[in-house]
Image (tube, rainbow, N blue to C red):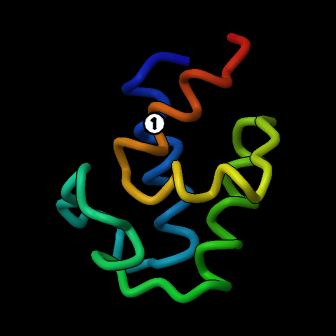
Amino acid sequence: MNELDLNLVVRGVLAQIAPEAAGEELDAEVELVEQLDLDSMDFLNFVIGLHEATGIDIPERDYPRLATLAGCVEYLRLHSTH
């Protein structure tokens, strides 16, 4: 998957977790928890959704790397086998 595809995947999963994220202009460098007022369960569901959408295993130690939209896309790009 290229960066655009990964960006769409991340935004799609976010929209499932936080419907207010759909169509929202997100700052790629600001923490998602802050922008979307996500709690810890929302974030965990987001990580699970990313795994289900991409098949990429995301260990808990890597969760901080998923804090921003840009971080998510970069993490998934680096761990994607496609």
Camera-nearest residue between 74 and 82: 74
Helix, strand, or loop for circle 1?
helix
**Disc 1 packing (10 Å; few <14; some 14–19; many ≥20):** many
Question: What x and y, as percent, mark residue 9?
Answer: 52, 42
Q: Is residue 8 above or below residue 79?
A: below
Question: What x and y, as percent, mark residue 22?
Answer: 35, 66
Which residue in the structure is indicated by mark 1? Answer: 73
Camera-nearest residue between 8 and 59: 59
Residue at (41% x, 23% y) in the render: 3
Side of 80 relative to 72 (left or right): right
Label 1 amino acid?
A: Val
Question: What x and y, as percent, mark residue 33?
Answer: 41, 76
Q: Quadrant of residue 7?
A: top left
Q: Is residue 44 above or below residue 1?
A: below
Image quarter hosting the N terminus = top right
Question: What x and y, as percent, mark residue 18?
Answer: 47, 78
Residue at (25% x, 61% y) in the render: 30
Q: Is residue 53 above or below residue 64?
A: above
